[in-house]
Image: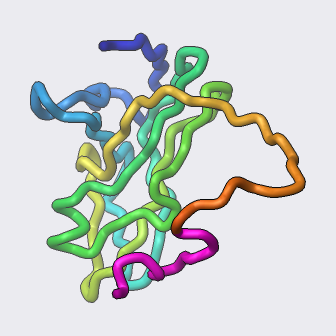
Amino acid sequence: MSVEILVTRLPHGEGLPLPSYATEGAAGMDLLAAVAEPLVIPPGGRALVPTGLRIALPHGHELQVRPRSGLALKHGITMPNTPGTVDEDYRGELQVIVLNAGSEPFTIERGMRIAQAVVAPVTRGVWKEVVELPDTTRGEGGFGSTGTR
């Protein structure tokens, strides 16, 4: 299944390919860094990395922005708000908050694949206040309570 995403390029995104799927079975599209010069993120540091793109998602969808597993494993590069959510009514530039949890400085170059984006349908919840919730076997157990016996 495919949905159409309208996209415009900002001047600093010119010349970069649009996000795309690396393989036929990939769930996420690669987002590329639209930096003018190399951006060095020190260990423990974070940066807002531009993509040079603005989008309009179809009604009832979000774009989930997630870390790339290879960058996380090899360099400790992740996102502190993962997954980041881009709402259907957002029209600003797509940008990625990148965190260097590694032990070495990490350099982001123009055109580098910095994150992946997954288009997902959104189900909206409606709160219904009740006096009592139905019982379950688990009850109030949480924060590691399952599978400890």
Q: Nearer the viewer, residue 40 or 83?
A: 83
Residue shown at 53%/25% (left/top)?
A: 61
Residue shown at 63%/28% (left/top)?
A: 91
Q: Is residue 10 visible from the viewing direction of this image?
A: no
Asked where in the image residue 13 lies, by quadrant, the reply is top left
Q: Nearer the viewer, residue 31 or 106?
A: 31
- Give how far across and how far down residue 12 sits, in percent: 43, 36
The quarter of the rendered structure image containing the C terminus is bottom left
Q: Is residue 144 magenta?
A: yes
Q: Nearer the viewer, residue 145 or 64?
A: 145
Q: Is residue 57 left or right of residue 26?
A: right
- Give how far across and how far down residue 18 sits, in percent: 30, 26
Q: Is residue 11 left or right of residue 89?
A: left
In the image, residue 85 sits, relative to residue 82, either above or below, namely: above
- Give how far across and how far down residue 96 sits, in percent: 46, 52
In the image, residue 8 sits, relative to residue 11, either above or below, namely: above
Q: Which residues are magenta?
A: 138-149
- Give how far across and how far down residue 74 sits, in percent: 15, 72
Q: Nearer the viewer, residue 27 or 33?
A: 27
Q: Is residue 27 magenta?
A: no
